Amino acid sequence: MKFDVIIVGSGFAGSTLARKFALDNKKVLIYEKRGQIGGNMYDKVLDNSILVHQYGPHIFHTNSKKVMDFVTQFGSWYFYEHKVVGKINNTLVPIPFNFKSLELLYSKEQADIIKEKLLAKYKDTKKVSILDLINDSDETIKQFGLFVYKNVFENYTAKQWNIPIEEIDTSVINRVPVILGYDDRYFQDEYQYMPKHGYTKVFEEMLNHPNITIKLNTNALEDIEIKDNKIYWQNQEFHGKVFYTGAIDELFNYKYGPLPYRSLDLVFENYDMNYYQSSAVVNYPNDEKYTRITEFKYLSNQLVNNKTTILKEYPKKYDYQDENSIPYYAIINEENQNMYQKYYELVKKIPNLYMCGRLAEYKYFNMDAVILRALELYEKVGK
Ligand SMILES: Cc1cc2nc3c(=O)[nH]c(=O)nc-3n(C[C@H](O)[C@H](O)[C@H](O)COP(=O)(O)OP(=O)(O)OC[C@H]3O[C@@H](n4cnc5c(N)ncnc54)[C@H](O)[C@@H]3O)c2cc1C
């Protein structure tokens, strides 16, 4: 069969592109090396009837109407605002740290002083970066910032990334702000919804189109070769477009070395009880080896009697030579970005090759950002 477009990977990057090209009457071939579609959003129902996210909890949130309009074409979605607490000094407090967290960890008198100062200083904003707080000229605010930094960020970050917090890119630290008020939602985005029947069903609907062919359990690099800045598919030069959403270093056979990632050991546990914990997610920044525990029933809004499933996440090193090791988080620093850029220079020489998604672009993208990038890439090069 002749294809117009080849897409490597069936996460949100690949599936969004596939859908758009299919609607434009292009014949699309998707390669997926795993046994199922959906990338890291893949979810499934366990024997105990609980819907779990196989590659870690995925909560959908966005400020983009365009993205929301796109995803809600596929199945029903329900309103869901995510809540997280963290175990700090043996007390469960809202994360991101807010005024309620402050009141739970400080005396009433101290909490009142800090709240008053924060509101006076940052009166035009509802959230503030921890880095701004620790650099504040007011000693009370600075000390409060240092307290949050130490108890909420420092050890969590060290566990997650296995490097001191000073070496972490500030964009990572700024992802979780301090909230100046009582808003205890983990995200403040305008649209916060979850797919009613899970992400896998969304992907099934997205890819259910006569113009889309999916090859599961197949590494695309078995069929695709790059030679003299040209793409060969099954030994013939391919003149259509190729969208690659896998790891860029793998595409070029690690020519400049492997791009570093952090990985996770994901440990699922089933219990015969209604609920294991009081929130969807409990973060453990300090003493435990895992960083957080997710209880899936909260995310899926399921009413299952006397059964529940939780997930503990243990950060670990990623090993590109071990096929069971999964690259989860790109380790963003200057050196690694320079290595990425060297790989990207190779891509630029191939006119019909495009990179899209978290692995191909070596960035931390939320799902909505990836969908938006795929939609915009299609608008730019699709026609
Ligand atoms: C633990 C964790 C939790 C997260 N939680 C959230 C969250 O709550 N909310 C949120 O918005 N975002 C979250 N994210 C981010 C989210 O996972 C990404 O935005 C999303 O996965 C990006 O989609 P993608 O298509 O770029 O990549 P992926 O989902 O990784 O899809 C890439 C696909 O390509 C396939 N592939 C790669 N190479 C090849 C090859 N050579 N041949 C064939 N197939 C190949 C892979 O098997 C994979 O299926 C989380 C990320 C992690 C790591």
Image: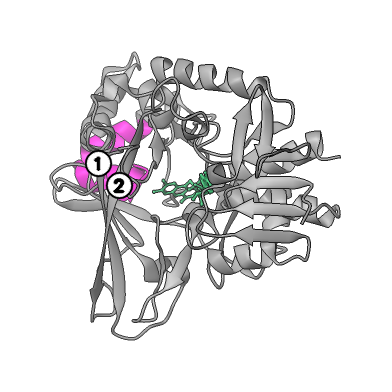
Residue 188 in picture, x, y percent from top left: 52, 46
User: Depth check: 29 or 316 in front?
Assistant: 29
Q: Are marks 2 and 1 in contact (CB under 8 Å)?
A: yes
Residue 117 in picture, x, y percent from top left: 36, 27
What quarter of the picture does the N terminus occupy? Answer: bottom right
Residue 173's label in the rendered image is: none
Residue 264's label in the rendered image is: 2
The image quadrant of residue 83 is: bottom left
How far is mark 2 from mark 1, CA to CA?
5 Å
Instruction: Identify the residue shown where x is 68% and y is 42%.
Output: 374
Magenta span: 94-116
Q: In this view of the protein, can residue 65 be seen by the observer?
A: no
Question: Does residue 249 lie above or below 220 as drawn?
Answer: above
Question: Does residue 348 lie above or below 48 as drawn?
Answer: above
- Residue at mark 1: 316
At mark 2, the secondary structure is strand
User: Depth check: 4 or 300 in front?
Assistant: 4
Residue 254 in picture, x, y percent from top left: 43, 27
Residue 257 placement, left or right of 226:
left
At mark 1, the secondary structure is strand
